[in-house]
Image (cartoon, grey):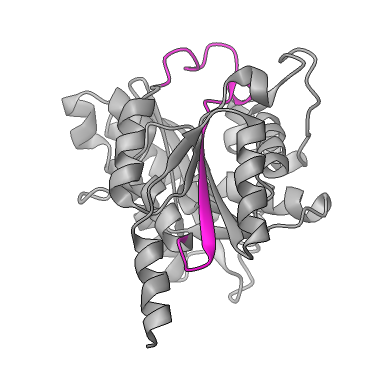
Amino acid sequence: MSRSGDSLRTKAAARSPRTVRTVRAVREAISEWRAAGESIAFVPTMGNLHAGHLSLARLVAEPRTRVVMSIFVNPTQFGPGEDFAAYPRTLTEDTALVTAAGTVDLLFAPEAADIYPFGLNSAARVSVPELGRELDGASRPGHFDGVASVVTRLLNIVTPDVLMLGQKDYQQFILMQRMIADLHLPVVLRMGPTHREPDGLAMSSRNRYLDADQRARAPALQAALARVRDAVRGGATNFADLGAAAKQDLESAGFKPDYVEVRRAADLAASNAADGREARVVIGAAWLGRARLIDNLLV
């Protein structure tokens, strides 16, 4: 490798993030980078960061690519009675984690008034297709419209070349993929793999709601999905029975299951059990105490 190539890689691995609060500051930074011929990658988050979030930034922190990460607890994706007020806001700790990781160039931490300048009640909304009212959307009415509304705004502010989302929120990824195509947004969407604790629990900001006993039982969700995945790989075709059995297993483990389903991986449509070539995903959600846990496994 040439010395110039070594220099670029060293620069990419030792980034020091600058925190900004306003749309104007983001756009000024983006303009400077564009003028220098650099591309932009974007990782949107709600903060309370963990290794999964940091892995998304690491995947796109390439030479000549600037990485923007947002931290914004979006009020429009929380329904009545959900945990918007209690959702952990840990900007100081998040900034320290991002700085130590060295893979983010700009940390965007706006206030709600910056994202919704006309207020929440008068804000323009983006409505997603019917899939947004299934699975997680059935339990959280309006949630994915709120996600789509904030992601559209953030994409318009950051204007990235690449948008990086995680596999753990698989339904969100599929809906954002559809929205980007439907609205002809000029961004490439990439998926980063789910990051897990050593015992298999998918990393999530809401895992902090678990007490010690619940935390010990929490990996049972991933285990239940894995049994369904293995059965499908083994040739099982009665997906409804597999999902029902998984929910019973979760109830026995102390969960309050929401759903466990086998869906087509490409678009989360109902899976055709007769099509052996079809890529599938096992997707599920369940309550464990205050924490609503979600997970998925590709078949």
Q: Residue visible at 78% across and 28% down?
A: 125
Q: Main secondary structure of the magenta part?
A: loop
Q: Is residue 8 above or below residue 259?
A: below
Q: Position of residue 236 (x, y in %)?
A: 47, 65
Using the rendered view, name the quadrant where residue 263 is placed: bottom right
Along the viewing direction, whichever of 196 and 25 lies nearer the viewer = 25
Residue bounds of the magenta highlight: 61-87
Along the viewing direction, whichever of 126 and 131 lies nearer the viewer = 126
Q: Position of residue 116 (x, y in %)?
A: 70, 22
Q: Is residue 275 left or right of residue 259?
A: right
Q: Position of residue 15 (x, y in %)?
A: 38, 54
Q: Residue visible at 78% across and 20% down?
A: 123
Residue 196 at least partly seen:
no
Q: Position of residue 234 (x, y in %)?
A: 41, 71
Q: Residue visible at 70% across and 57% down?
A: 187
Magenta span has 206? no
Magenta span has 78? yes
